Amino acid sequence: MKNIYILGGNGLIGKEIVKLYSKDKVKIFVLDIKKISFSKKKNIKFVKFDCSKLQNSQYKIKSIFEQNGKPDIFINCSYPSTKNWSKSTINNFKYKILKENFEIHLNNYVWTAKIIANEMKRYKSGSIILLGSIYGYVAQDPLIYEDTGIRENYNYSIIKSGIIGSTRQLASFFGKYNIRINCVCPGGIEGHIKGSKQKQSKKFKKKYLNKILLNRLCKPEEAANVCKFFASDMASYVTGQTIFVDGGYTAI
């Protein structure tokens, strides 16, 4: 029976990944800060883990594996950020905001993936999936955000670009150990805005959807489906790759 570790398993996409795997004969470990109620399936276990505290994360992760078993699949769909994250606009940007968010978001993805890959190396197999964004590949269009109540985020694009790059770099080192490392990059997700319970405004949606060939936002489960594909045997010959789940945003 495979062990599936999902970091950020309580988030929009994380919850959908948990639902997908809950139907399978696997053991699911939800790594997150706060516990939320999942179905009463016996194959789901919550493990408290704060991915923003990187200093001792190596020892914490190894301890989790010792208690629960080796990682066959690791999916990082966490979205750590500082309280001032929303102030990361191009006009209000400060170096402190950049530094702090790089530390807990980009460094979290790069460092934990390296720790996991080293652990998988012992078993000569494993699959790691990292969550990026289309904004790690294309720039944010300022016109989409004008007069919508939603602002662009300068450090977000830089961080997600780093995650895409680290996916390729890690894959190049760990491929010889039969460890596959891939990246899933969703476009705009249907749901609440980061740091708020509010959803995207109608004005923002109208502008954004003008760039989407399928003319709708991405459903969280659609991004989750691609994560599961990357982790499955159907993608056994795929590594170092990035799939854009964006309804065609990056196609034109």
Image: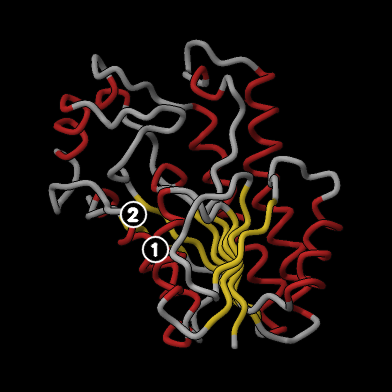
Please state, as top left, top right, bottom left or bottom right, where the N terminus lies in the image. Answer: bottom right
Against 176, is 10 above or below?
A: above
Please name whichever residue, 204 or 78, is drawn nearer the observer in this view of the structure.
78
Query: Quick one: SS at disc 1?
Result: helix
Query: Quick one: SS at disc 2?
Result: helix
Against 190, is 223 above or below?
A: below
Residue at 73% from the left image edge and 78% from the top image edge: 70
Residue at 67% from the left image edge and 19% from the top image edge: 95
Q: CA distance from mark 1 to mark 2?
A: 6 Å
Residue at 49% from the left image edge and 27% from the top image edge: 154
Left/right of residue 57 with respect to residue 229 in the rendered view:
right
> How has the structure been colored for display?
secondary structure
- In the image, residue 206 lies at what x, y percent? 14, 32
Three-letter code, disc 1? Ala
Determine which of the numbered discs, if any, sits on residue 220 in the image. Answer: 2
- In the image, residue 205 lies at what x, y percent? 19, 33
Three-letter code, disc 2? Pro
Left/right of residue 144 with respect to residue 73 in the rendered view:
left
Mark 1 highlights which residue?
224
Against 126, is 200 above or below?
A: above
